[in-house]
Image: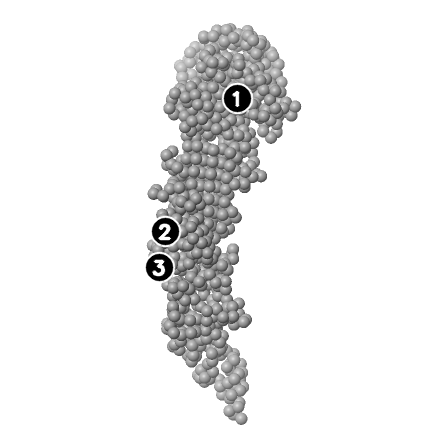
Amino acid sequence: MKNMYQLLCISLIAFLPLKEIHFYKGFKTLYDKEAIAAIQKQLTAPTDFFESNADGNWDALTSWKSSSVSSSGPWTIPATSFPTNSAQGILIKHSITLQAGTNQTASLLVIANGGTLIHTSTGILTLSDDGTSATDFLIQNGGVYELHGRQPVYANGPTVVIENGGITRAKSNPGESDDFARQNNVYFQTGAVMEWNTSQQFQTNNFVYFPTATINDHPIFRITAKINAQGGNGNTTFNGKFEVATGFTFTFQNGGEKTFRDGFGGGGILIHSSGTNPCGPFKITGANAVIDGNLDLQLRNNSLNANELEITSGANVTISDPNVHVGNFSNSGSTLLIDGTLNISAGINIDLQYGNLILNGKIDGASAGAFSAGSSSTNSINIDIGGTNGNAGILNFATGFNFVNNFTINRTGTSTPRIILGSNLTANNFILTAGKIITGNNLISWNNSGATIPGNSTSYFATCTVANELDEKGTPLNFPFPYSGNVGVRILNVNNELPVYFPVGPNLVSYNKIFLQNGSTLINNPFTVSVAIGDIGNTPLPRVNRIWYINEANPGTSSSDMRLYFTKHSNTTGFPVSEDEVEFGFDYDDCHLIQETYVNQFIHNSNGADIVQNTAAPDLSEIFAKYTRGISYGLDGNNDGIDTFSRFSIVNAQGIILPVTIIDFHVFKFNDQVNISWKSLEEKNILAYEIERSGNGKSFTCIKKMPAQKNAINENKYFFIDSVPLAGKNYYRLKIWDETGAYSYSEIQEVWMEKDFSKFEIYPNPITSNLPEIHIQNHGLPPGDYNFLLLNMEGKIISEKKFFINNTMNVTWKINQQLLPGMYFLKIQNEKCTQSKPLIVF
């Protein structure tokens, strides 16, 4: 009976962890750890759990220790056999070798951190499915499965998983090492590595690596050995990322497509071969692909009429690698095709100096990097913007590397087809078929060598900015006057009677091109254009609501014909809301091209046969106003065409400022009256001036008509006092009549009249002329900032200064110049009031 009792106890203990044994107090005679260990040692069986004990061979007992309790130990029993597929778990933490001449079986096999399983070329390992566990062979982070030309034999469909940081390393490949990465039961998860560490080639002819990697799995195929160029004429696919480690070079050749779903990386050199065995296209297809690390990616021209690197439709690639080269000095002409989306990280420039770019997809809105194109106009780079996706994003070029040979746009789509230029760009040729090129605040230069194309209403340069990708209209450029030509569209070689078109518009909805035909023989005469929306100034009648700003790089060297184009809108429709192009009431049979200087003087006005009649033109058709040499006369009396360039627009005859220059137009309050004075220069064919007044700035009434003095050489001075101004705001302007009955207007001046407004006093009055001081005694001016103006009798400002006045604070104004004896006026004004006082200087 005692022996039976002990056997029963031993049978129970065999199935209990040590930590639980002490609960069974009935087994007092066995409550001894050494005794328990001795009993468990006798119970070791092939179904127990195994863990590596030391480096060694699989079939060596000293390589293992065992536990009959659980896969986590305790490992207290030296193994009495090596593990097989009958074991309940096999854990490798050391270097274990499947030596030659042995056939091993396994299930529930784990290579842990620090562990290595070396599968020799003649060793055989049969993996089997245990029937219950999801994974039968697991390579954990830090674990290594080393293949020497042999992979496992798979019985009953076992599942193999390589986790993030797990490595499968190929050390040689007589035929099976690469097969392991192409099995449908082998799962490389994100960060799992297939490391190619042999000079022997892997198979690249109609093969797929990582076939079970889902779109959420991103494994890595990594080259860590020197290997000769390889690649079959069939297609090869890596459902992961392809890396070349630092210090190594890998070359793909032959015509098959090489698809890398998740992109490239590493710190070595990856070459797309040209030469005698040119490589087929590289393709990136992943939605979260990258080109990263410090990989030197050399995309050499394959001469196969195929693109060297394609980012396919639906792919999204982020490039943070500074060493991406599309072509090189000795092998130019490679092409980067973007059918998907490209994001270039900040500070990264993709080397395009010897290659081409086809953009059918999009540059991501978050992209902050650039392309390095050519450094001079002698380059052969071609940019082709195509596709049907509307907005193509923002295209940036590195400073000093922004020259291309041909720039083509043929972009369509439901949203406004366009490419936004995020930097300056110079092209030898622009080919505009469909889609708009947005200049932004940049200078786009066209190195034309002959006549340019006129463009069309769906493909032109929009001299504007856009707020974001949803902005379907755009905002015209804003720049200081005079226009220096530092932004907009520049065309070189506008000379030798060549017809040159500037295909431009102020935004994404209006096309307002320019035609120039210049008689200059200057070899390189650049002109720059930007189009704005608005009134050129002093044109009170209906007009074309466009201003063309033109800058000539070599002033005074040109004599040109010009045409300004716009779209006809029926007068019955009023001011078109969509384009704001023509004001209601514009007379299409009286189209005048006019030019105004930056000091508000009109110097050219088309006349004679250049007055274009467009009433018969169909509505919404493209029409123009023109100025032609030998037909239209400038205000200087010559008819040699336009020889200076500033700003231009289109108006009717009655809305044109006449050939007179108004200067020193002053309106100021003196006591309860308003003094009005002005001077005119070049007073030709002027009949009279009317002084008009308004209380709202819109409806004006004539208060005085004065005949012109008609002194065409000297200044003509005029003065008038409005003794009964309106209470509150008063607006004044001059209506200028010529001898033909035409008229124009001056700018508008404003004063504020407060009948009960408190006055100020000047003391002493008179003052001395030598560096005088003016003392102003305040009698209740409201607190605020005021402009103090010292005017002479002609209304000219002698000195000006700003003061802040608070309640009854008095002011002393030191005039830092000597004054001539005579009568002056001190004028104090702000947005609410204007006060004037006479001042005598002796």
Residue at label 1? 649
Mark whose residue sits in front, 2 or 1: 2
| Amino acid type indicated by mark 2 | Ile
The span from disc 2 to disc 1 (Cα, nearest Å) is: 58 Å
| Amino acid type indicated by mark 3 | Ser
Mark whose residue sits in front, 2 or 3: 3
Q: Nearer the viewer, residue 309 or 603?
A: 309
Task: Identify which residue is drawn at 50% across, 49% down.
Answer: 315
Task: Identify which residue is drawn at 61% across, 25% down.
Answer: 619
The disc label shown at residue 269, or none: 2
Q: Nearer the viewer, residue 61 or 655?
A: 61
Residue 76 versus residue 110 in the image, above or below: below
Question: Which secondary structure, mark 1?
Answer: strand
Task: Identify which residue is drawn at 35% across, 55% down.
Answer: 228
Residue 516 versus residue 261 in the image, above or below: above
The disc label shown at residue 199, or none: 3
Residue 294 seen anywhere in this rendered image of the structure: no
| Amino acid type indicated by mark 1 | Ser
